[in-house]
Image (cartoon, rainbow, N blue to C red):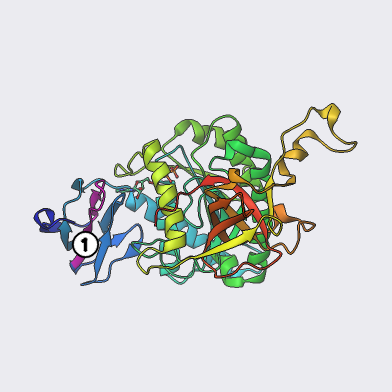
Amino acid sequence: MTEEKSVSKEYKLDPDCELRFEIESKNEKTVVELKAGQAEVFGTELVKGKKYEFGSGAKIAVYSWQGCTLDLIGKPDVIYIAKETPMSIYLNVHAAMERMREAAEKSNDVKGPITMVVGPNDVGKSTLSRILLNYAVRIGRRPIFVDLDVGQGQIAIPGTMSALLVERPSNIVEGFSQQAPLVFHYGQKTPSANTTLYNLLVSRLAEVCSERLQGNKKARASGIIINTCGWINGEGYKLLTHAAQALEVDAILVLDQERLYNELVRDMPEFVKVVFLPKSGGVVSRSQQFRIESRDQKVREYFYGIKTPLYPHNIDIKWSDAKIYKIGAPVLPASCMPLGMKAEDNLTKLVAVTPGPNLLHHLLSVSFADSPEDDVVQTNVAGFVCVTKVDVDKQTITVLSPQPKLLPNSVLLLSDIQFMDSN
Ligand code: ATP
């Protein structure tokens, strides 16, 4: 933030209004402080007198139910106060979910609401999921958050599918706490890259979530909130209906697309409530370039931290010691498949990868599986490393890792996603 550009300005918000701002310029920062009244960012309350610092790429709305005074230092590229917001509609959705939770609490075999948020790209699906999760934890609930958005997910790094038991509101700047998420390796940034694997992992995630709900009464009454990808046509629509069935959803919130709403009303069983919701006028469309940068940013944050810096390690691994695999082999014609196997089975097959220069900059997931003989594809992952160097002469790879050591037999899963470590 350059000196001449940092401007401090007071904003007064009337009840049910929000201050929206976007920071596009590199190295620009904006600091927000609540001076009086009450305000929240995507469902998390601001603490009065605390300074919240947002960096480049931030697209934020500070909303107030009762009105407030804010102090803002910096010069965002876009800033305005909006009087029209869908927040009271979203609050009504939360209230309806809360009634279902109260009913679930009174009974042993009824689950809390399992709600899936769907819609095209850039309609605020992730934001609505975050708001509903925050409202739930703020009144003592412990919902599970499932993020099926493999490209722009909020839980782990891109190329994964994950679930998280949400125990406290998301951090205003850093999002949800990353403590003990359940993460599966998908290895691609779009579901279209391997829909068979995508569906398999959704079913596996659903199974684990269902077990967790069985074992934890509080989570069971709190339910699940599921965020999805913006691919809603053709095959993408089928992925959504598969996820709805696998996760046994009982409500689908459709943001901003009447066609999708009508298709779901037509195709979902009667007990699934399909609700149409308007998108917020504040939701910002993100360019392809911005999406690439935010994926990169997410990986950088994983290795180097956001506010509190992290210091990752460089580990050398001999090619002969590396157990690297990828999921999915090319699909062969059915006539070439061994007896009893379908052509799609190849798409979820574990295939050994010979180390070499082709690994450079690729992310590798570290599987919890003890050996490649286990069901690696459906086993969750412990973390990630990134190949920063390949030495052909010494036959080694160097990986960037949050941990100083990898277990000797670690099974590593190759991701299509790359990260250039510039630190
Ligand atoms: P995708 O399909 O790509 O995952 P999405 O539908 O989940 O997108 P979001 O990620 O929720 O959309 O929102 C897009 C961007 O708009 C985000 O950067 C978010 O911070 C911003 N945004 C959401 N709501 C508002 C708002 N009311 N005011 C300002 N910015 C907002």
Image-based side of 90 in relation to 192, left or right: left
The kind of secondary structure element at disc 1 is strand
Residue pictured at 52% horizontal, 35% vertical: 232
State the image quarter where residue 333 is shown: top right
Q: Position of residue 50 (x, y in %)?
A: 24, 71
The residue positioned 30% from the left and 41% from the top of the image is 281
Counting from the top left corner in percent of width and height, residue 312 is at: 47, 66
Q: At 40% from the left edge and 36% from the top edge, which residue is drawn? A: 288
Magenta-drawn segment: 16-34
Q: Is residue 343 above or below residue 254?
A: above
Which of the pair 105/77 is nearer the observer? 77
Residue in the image at 46% along x and 47% along y: 152
Instruction: For ligand 1, tell me if the residue under mark 1 lies within 8 Å.
Output: no
Task: Give the residue type that dot 1 points to.
Answer: Val
- Determine the residue located farthest toward the front in the rendered image: 393
Q: Badge 1 local density, few (<14 within 10 Å), some, or many (20+)?
A: many
Percent of width and height locating residue 38: 24, 66
- Quadrant housing the C terminus: bottom left
* Quadrant in the picture for residue 340: top right
Which residue is disc 1 drawn over? 32
Residue 321 visible in the shown view:
yes
Residue 203 vertical placement versus 313 (above, below): above
Which one is in front, 179 or 212?
179
